[in-house]
Amino acid sequence: MITKENEVDFSGVEETALLTLYSRAMESRSDNPILKDEKAEELVEKIDRMLEKRNGKMAKLLVSRSIDPKLTVHIPLRAKKFDEYASMFLQRHPDSVVVNIGCGMDTRFFRVDNQKINFFDIDLPEMIRCKKQLIAEGSRYKMIGQSVLEMDWMDVISVFNKPVIFLAEGVFMYLPRESVMSLVLELQKRFPGSELVCELTNRTWVNGFWGKVAAMKMKKRFKMGSDAGFKFGVSDARELESWHKGIEFLDQWFYMDSNHPKLGWIQLFKNIKFFRNSQFTAHYRLNAQ
């Protein structure tokens, strides 16, 4: 909502959404940026003026640009790869539909728009209510304020009867396994021939010792609460194929595969299986079978 001072009320909005937005904007303004995101730059200028009046730790961290440097590299690299998956799909299907699941404060439409697509951002009502105060919808760009697990949002997409690509960046690992499975199976059933790109976490990081390590890392890096932690993990990317014969694994990507110089010394871990399989992006085709 807009306050009487004509400012956006961020209450109810996950602060990690602002953290990823600021990470992209900071990198966009750097020398030789990994990802150029002019819309993100524009938004943080607006949001800065509002956050300067707040006393929270996250607000101060964002305004002062005191974000973990690893995040300002990792998050733009991930966003760029999701953009590339979308762009490759659009090369084959210029007049298609892109659905950004759990969009947060992402500005992907403005980075991949080919002047033909229909693009949908979907996230919880509080997030979309806030986002609509900052970004205007258009004839081909719409926002849906609804839990992605409330499957009736798919009715809006199905009326187009066009090829669809679903993007789930930094979403599935925070949902229960049963919810992720139900969602993917419903997409497979209702949108045959569509594609799904999603970020996945190895189940090693969900429970036990390494699960606690992951939770501590999120609390420190993302300033998340005491209940922080992953809920869903897989043994490998092909595990989703076992859910239904119509789910076809195509490829996967680990952010160190970019070989970007800004990754620095951390690339030494690139070929160590434990790290490669910890968190990655997977690409699937959802066939009607």
Image (cartoon, grey):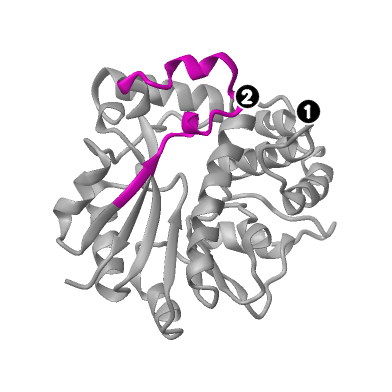
Q: Nearer the viewer, residue 17 or 27?
A: 27
Count of numbered marks: 2
Q: Which residues make up the magenta segment?
A: 250-273
Q: Quick check: can you spot residue 196?
A: yes
Above or below residue 77? Residue 108 is below
Q: What percent of the width, then of the height, locates residue 148?
A: 40, 62
Q: Quick check: can you spot residue 281?
A: no
Q: Amino acid at mark 2?
A: Pro
49 left or right of 68 in image: right
Q: Amino acid at mark 1?
A: Ser
**Residue lying at 61% horizontally and 77% vertically, measured from the top left:** 116
Q: Secondary structure at mark 1?
A: loop
Q: Nearer the viewer, residue 22 or 229?
A: 22
Closest to the camera, between mark 1 and mark 2, is 2
Q: Which residue is mark 2?
A: 261
Q: What percent of the width, then of the height, locates residue 185?
A: 24, 63
Q: What percent of the width, then of the height, locates residue 115?
A: 67, 74
Residue 206 in the magenta stretch? The answer is no
Considering every residue shown, the one lying at the far front of the view is 92
Disc 2 residue crowd, few under 14, some 14–19, many 20+, Cα 10 Å: few
Q: Which mark is residue 12?
A: none
Q: Nearer the viewer, residue 237 or 100?
A: 237
Q: What percent of the width, then of the height, locates residue 264?
A: 59, 18
Disc 1 residue crowd, few under 14, some 14–19, many 20+, Cα 10 Å: few
**Residue lying at 44% horizontally and 77% vertically, measured from the top left:** 157
Q: Which residue is mark 1?
A: 64
**Residue lying at 31% horizontally and 52% vertically, measured from the top left:** 250
